[in-house]
Image (spheres, rainbow, N blue to C red):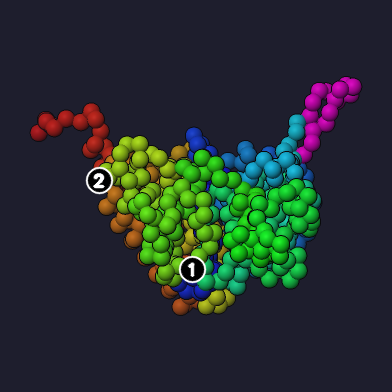
Amino acid sequence: MPCTTILVGKRASYDGSTIVARNEDSKNGEFTPKRFAVVLPDEQPRTYTSVIGHLTIELPQDPMRYTSLPNALPDEGLWAAAGINEANVGMSATETITSNTRVLAADPLVPYVPAHGNPGDDDYVPEQAGGIGEEDMVTLVLPYIHSAREGVLRLGQLIEQYGTYEMNGIAFHDADEIWWLETIGGHHWIARRVPDDCYVVMTNQLGIDWFDLADAEGAGRGYLCSPGLRTFVEDNYLDLTIRDHYGIGSNGEPANVFNPRLDFGSTSDADHVYNTPRAWAIQRLINPNGNKWDGPDADFRPESDDIPWCRVPERAITMGIIKRALSLHYQGTPYDPYGTSGSPSERTRYRPIGINRTSQLCATQLRTYASGDDYAVQWIAFGSNPFNAFIPLFANVDTVPEYFSNTGAEVSTQSFYWANRLIGALADASYHRSLPHVERYQAEVVSRARGILLETRKRRSSLEEANETIARMVREHTEDLLGKVLFETSMGMRNSYSRSDN
């Protein structure tokens, strides 16, 4: 999926939490309805068969409860997307990433191959199951892991055994660590621990730009990888680092260190309009003073290939900054589709982060200062991010509010997903008139929801009841906003006329 991910280490966040956030965006020309769900142990399958890969896998018999954001329509499978399990481990899967022909020739992807001919015929060839993919990963991993590192190792073993039919980046986190795993071809993978004082931006490219292979093969303090990765790299001449007699690279890389982004990833013209501008926009927001971002002498431009994978923020990162970053459409630059400073071609040059076809935004937050079940909070938003609100909900629950879970095939204002889709389409058409209503709504519902979370912690009251209270409040304000943007858009209809009958 064409997504955008932000990872925030515990010393980079405003409250010591580890935070993993990701937009899940549909393919161009599609809009995928999503819902919020909790999966209880007796609802988790013991034998899993994927829809896309036609792959059957036997699963452990002791799953934990976990939250998820699955597709509302199961025609392409579950696509559980992101959640937190009862061991307070979060997972987000996946950020679709890129590769290159050298890697894919050496370790091809594992697609599903349909059967050929008819059973019993001499030329009949049975179907070949594909590997695992985004559809499957949360379901196969999250119910069974007790730490972020354990998540990396479980998913890594599944990729080694079954392969994958696509390149993906996957995030795992617990209270102490965040790990980011990237698939390399059909069966290999690497993972790097996010430094505690850093944040990471991922934008549909293979992103890790520094990897210590010796640590990955040894202690695994900050790096992990699939067995045999060194041989795979050496046998297929994948390391592009120019080294001297002592193994030191031209940019000072010591022996055993390489740049996966250059070796395993891509730097295509498409990357420069679709991927790198998003990383530029988010780091420009979070680190505005550390680099020069604009003008002919900028350190980094929207099409730069060397924007860092991780960096220390100038200020601690809040949930508000995460929401703003994942809603960006290049405000304050010539590239804003709603702006007036750029030329028409500039305003459509780069792919926005806050795009029309976002299905859901989820941030999983593990709060080390909390005690008991209120430790884990899952923030959700549906539809196009410039026009929606980021709603915090307790994750250690057995049920979720119907308003967030009842998405169906039919458009309905009774559903939070569909209400947000309607608001986004209407507000886009009347952007400057509707924006004040949207901004007031966003501030109001988030501040009220935060207040409910705080009051619940103080009183030690039911988490399910708190979530239901938030849902009722959000529904009231969402319906009010829908009425306001409908009025503003109706007033701008081209068949209006200034004279009336009164």
Quarter of the image with the N terminus is top right
Q: Residue at x 57, y 49 (%)?
A: 205
Q: Is residue 31 magenta?
A: no
Give the residue number, with chain letter if any, for mark 2.
Answer: 433
Q: Residue at x 62, y 57 (%)?
A: 259
Residue 348 at x, y = what percent? Answer: 38, 39
Quarter of the image with the C terminus is top left
Front residue of 94/288: it is: 288
Front residue of 277/256: it is: 256
Give the residue number, with chain letter if any, for mark 1.
Answer: 312
Amino acid at dot 2: Arg
Residue 384 at x, y = what percent? Answer: 42, 47
Amino acid at dot 1: Val
Residue 281 at x, y = what percent? Answer: 42, 54
Q: Main secondary structure of the magenta part?
A: loop
Q: Gap between marks 1 and 2, in whole Å?
A: 37 Å
Instruction: Give the residues in magenta.
Output: 115-129
Q: Residue at x 66, y 68 (%)?
A: 222
Q: Is residue 117 magenta?
A: yes
Considering only vertical position in the picture, is 309 above or below 147?
above
